[in-house]
Image: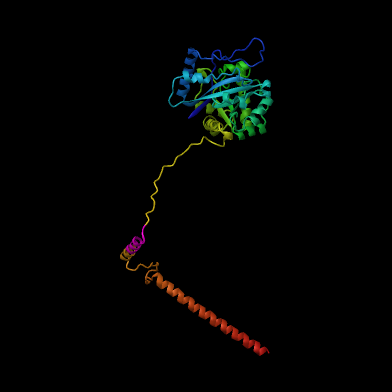
Amino acid sequence: MHFDLNFPVTASGSTSQPKKNKNKQPQQSSQAAFTPAQIKGIEARLDLLEHLGYTVIAFNQSVNKKIDPKTHVNILDGLLQQLRARPGTVFLKRLTIVLDNDSEKGFGLTNANASLVEPYDVIALLPTTPATFSLACLTHSLPSPLTAHIVALPLTLPRLPFQLKHTLVRTAIKNGAVFEINYAGAIGGESDASLSTFGVSDTGASGKRNWWAAAREVVRVTKGKGIIVSGGVASEADYRGPKDIANLLTLLDLAQNLAHDASVAAPKSLILRAQARKTYRAVLSEPRLVIPETTQVVAPIQQTGDSEKRDNVNISEKSSRSSPNPALTLPQPAGSKKRTCDEVSLESTANRHVNKKIREAANAEGQSRRKKKKGGNR
């Protein structure tokens, strides 16, 4: 079972940047839909991923700055209805929030927006400032229904906009979050178009060089733990198989077992935690009522005195027929005569009497000696 938790999709008319107020959140149209050409391209990409051996695919919807209840539209629900069924392949829905300076005041992961976030299976944060990176690692990685499961990193930028501090990274990993590495930047492929619009992605030779330098730093700080590798690829020619990705990660000084875990074990545990975090602090799971099978209890039959005596007589007769001596026999060593419990009890009683007499005689003899000694001293 192999995972690709970053399958970027963008609907036609899903985002529109106003001419005025260019720095504000792009408005999402409520009429966002996918054209037949886009559906055909997505189906072709899914066919290729299925051929390469991927069985769990997460469709990624990116949002800039914050979740705005007035403009936010879930485009993934309509997409899954238009795609054809694929037996053996699991489709997930992922929401990625790109954080910038305006997101430091809040980016929508609140209880008021819980209904907007609940349909998504995985939530990811892509910080671009030191303050938002600290928030993603310390605050929003704690187990809750609004937690961030993935901390995505802009590895193709000329330089990471924040420092990967050991305390922040260890805290995020301890809370259950993981750091994502998209291999699209390693091969200089075409990445998510929305990220390029938001200014957090760079392509070409410079982007490839930046990716290798930043990815090595991520592996060094995390020591290869708490890392997942995803595609983030928007073109069919840039997809790679799971074994190729594992070999690619070994070039980052990552051990082969850790490279395998980054594409198999870590994503699997992440999805399980994401499902459990929909409950209160991941403590309670969905209860299931189990009704035991009904058993019939037979009431005891009351018997009269004559019938009880008759039963007792029958029992005694049966026991006497089964064994000639109803007394219990004890095991004895080979060659010795078998003795009943009555014989053993009589013998032990006689021994107790003999021992008592011996003790009394010894006490009397001792008292007489003490009296004689006292008389001689006088």
- The location of residue 116, given as percent across then percent down, is 57, 23
Quadrant (top left/top right/bottom left/bottom right) for the C terminus: bottom right
Q: Is residue 222 magenta?
A: no
- Specify whether 350 is left or right of 261: left
Query: Residue pushed farthest top?
Result: 19
Task: Say which residue appears at 65% left-offset and 90% top-offset.
Answer: 376
Residue at x 61%, y 25% (from the top left corner): 112
Residue 26, image quadrant:
top right
Main SS, magenta residues: helix
The total of numbered circles placed on residues is: 0
Q: Is residue 106 above or below residue 370?
A: above
Q: Residue furthest left?
A: 321
Q: Nearer the viewer, residue 318 or 329?
A: 318
User: Coloring scheme of the render?
Assistant: rainbow
Residue 101 screen position, x and y as percent:
68, 21
Residue 88: give x, y in percent of width and height. 44, 27
Q: Nearer the viewer, residue 364 or 223?
A: 364
Q: Which residues are magenta?
A: 303-314
Q: Position of residue 173 (x, y in %)?
A: 61, 33
Quarter of the image holding residue 177?
Answer: top right
Please tell me which residue lies in front, 361 or 287: 287
Residue 305 drawn in magenta: yes
Instruction: Answer above or below: position of 74 versus 316.
Output: above
In the image, what residue occupies the spot 40% across and 71% down?
Answer: 342
Q: Which residue is pictured at 59% across the width and 23% down the height? A: 96
Q: Nearer the viewer, residue 141 or 153?
A: 141
Up-down relation of residue 341 to residue 210 (above or below): below
